[in-house]
């Protein structure tokens, strides 16, 4: 009986590790592994070092929960940011998205998820207690709830308004509406209804 | 690629890959099925806003190799009232979890579909107390439709009917394993049975009879309502052979504010 072909153990191990990455199947893993083999030693070492360095030096800011190298993070310690406004988002990638707008000058608070009964995620699994502590400490006048406009994000927003309002802080929700460059004809009913609800004087 | 139409309710939504989602639908025509919504997480997706959980819609699906793919969606009812309220949306999640976990895939079950639609319709308009009763009624009716109807009106051991007027002082019990009520005499021999007041069992019997889709007029003291919820949950978890996730979160949402 012919012996089944298999790669040399070090290569097989590399392929196996790569195939653990999201949306990388066995075929892609194989292609990446062969590419890595053809890289110069310096490049390969730089890649390995970058992974290890990111892994060891990136952590969550103890104030806002955003990913950072220094704790507290650059935004939390910046003298130019408005400390009276806190924008609440679901995850660190949302902070990056908000920062790209260059419109927001306040601070952030990353919840690291959203309330989702179907997945068994309740309010105590999120960084809500930390947010309440921040608000109770003083400085904050307004909390902008920028969780995703879907069921889980809405539930989280409703919960936050319930627990934040008694603290005497202004709680606002980001607007829902039509995407720039979009087309009314193709907008869904729910979004269009929300856009109509949130219309404003010209 | 052949296409087919189905009317359904979105029970669950999971994200996969960069911008795709997999939806679990409960359809009238084909029972529960999973379908992919390509690119639906993008802001400019035409599908995005129509594919929120608990939405009832008409779908045009294309047969795929592993998963069917959603081509078009037309919303029948978005149940905006559910989304606008924290507890209603949590109870809708309970309903969706039950339907998702109790039904096998591609097994047509039109009466359960009708039950889910009627329940979401009732939840859409319900206050917090009623939302819980509507959900528990759904749980009991779902169990009945699948052959797990509990016997609450009389003792499953000896057939003794529930005492009228709540039988003050009597300690009855409910046995998930036997699927029904136990009188004080028979309850002693069943260690797993949950002790409860006859009044709570009478409520189970009432909810089993109450037609779905209609408002529930039932005034219940707080502690009895918690008992009722636990009892219904125990009955379903026993049949499911697993723990339900949504009721645990609902409990925690109720306990406002969260422990700091």
Image: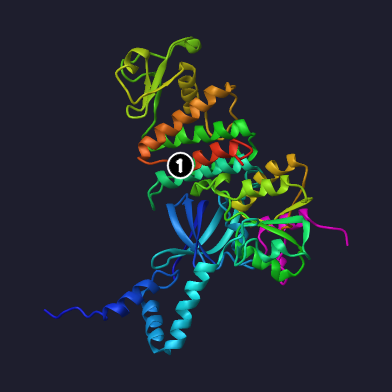
**Protein chain holding label 1:** B
**Residue B161 coordinates in the image, percent (x, y):** 39, 14
Residue under numbered circle 1: B112
Q: Is residue A53 above or below residue B113?
A: below
Q: Say what secondary structure mark 1 lies in.
A: helix
Q: Quadrant of the C terminus of chain B?
A: top right
Q: Is residue B75 above or below residue B232?
A: below
Residue A202 quadrant: bottom right
**Residue B6 coordinates in the image, percent (x, y):** 49, 56
Q: Residue at the spot x=55%, y=39% of the render?
A: B252
**Residue A47 coordinates in the image, percent (x, y):** 47, 80
Q: Residue at the spot x=50%, y=52% of the render?
A: B12
Front residue of B42 and A80: A80
Residue B222 quadrant: top right
Q: Find the magenta span and give its range.
A: A177-202
Q: Can residue B46 be seen here?
A: no
Q: Residue at the spot x=58%, y=21% of the render?
A: B221
Q: Rate crowding at label 1 as few (under 14), some (14 to 19) or many (20 or more) other CA atoms within 10 Å.
A: many
């Amino acid at each position: 009986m012919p012996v089944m072909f298999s790669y040399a153990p070090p290569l097989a191990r590399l392929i196996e590790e790569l195939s653990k990455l999201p949306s990388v199947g066995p075929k892609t893993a194989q292609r990446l592994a062969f590419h890595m083999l053809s890289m110069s030693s310096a490049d390969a070492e730089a890649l390995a070092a970058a992974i290890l360095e990111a892994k060891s030096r990136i952590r969550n800011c103890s104030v806002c929960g955003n990913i950072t190298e220094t704790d507290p993070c650059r935004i939390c310690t910046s003298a130019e940011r408005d400390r009276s406004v806190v924008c609440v988002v679901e995850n660190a990638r949302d902070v990056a998205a908000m920062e790209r707008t260059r419109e927001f000058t306040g601070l952030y608070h990353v919840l690291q998820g959203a309330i989702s009964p179907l997945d068994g995620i309740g309010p105590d699994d999120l960084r809500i207690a930390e947010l309440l502590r921040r608000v109770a400490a003083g400085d904050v006048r307004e909390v902008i709830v920028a969780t995703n406009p879907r069921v889980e994000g809405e539930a989280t927003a409703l919960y936050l308004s319930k627990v934040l309002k008694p603290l005497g802080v202004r709680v606002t929700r980001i607007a829902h509406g039509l995407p720039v460059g979009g087309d009314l004809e193709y907008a869904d009913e729910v979004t269009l209804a929300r856009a109509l609800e949130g219309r404003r004087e010209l | 690629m052949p296409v087919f139409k189905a009317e359904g309710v979105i029970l669950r939504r999971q994200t996969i890959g960069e911008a795709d989602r997999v939806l679990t639908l409960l359809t009238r025509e084909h029972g529960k099925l999973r379908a992919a919504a390509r690119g639906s997480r993008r802001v400019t997706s035409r599908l995005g806003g129509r594919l929120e959980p608990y939405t009832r819609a008409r779908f045009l699906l294309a047969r795929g190799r592993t998963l069917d793919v959603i081509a078009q969606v037309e919303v029948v009812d978005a149940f905006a009232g559910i989304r606008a309220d924290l507890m209603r949306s949590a109870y809708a999640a309970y309903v969706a979890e039950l339907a998702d976990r109790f039904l096998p895939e591609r097994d047509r079950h039109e009466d359960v579909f009708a039950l889910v639609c009627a329940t979401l319709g009732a939840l859409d308009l319900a206050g917090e107390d009623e939302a819980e009763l509507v959900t528990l009624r759904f749980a009991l009716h779902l169990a009945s439709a699948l052959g797990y109807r509990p016997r609450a009106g009389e003792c499953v051991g000896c057939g003794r009917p529930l005492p009228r007027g709540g039988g003050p002082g009597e300690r009855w019990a409910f046995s998930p394993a036997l699927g029904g009520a136990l009188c004080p005499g028979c309850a002693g021999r069943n260690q797993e049975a949950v002790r409860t007041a006859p009044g709570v069992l009478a409520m189970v019997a009432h909810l089993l009879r109450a037609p779905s889709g209609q408002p529930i007029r039932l005034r219940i003291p707080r502690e009895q309502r918690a008992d009722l919820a636990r009892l219904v949950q125990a009955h379903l978890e026993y049949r499911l052979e697993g723990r339900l996730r949504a009721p645990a979160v609902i409990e925690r949402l109720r306990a406002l504010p969260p422990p700091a």
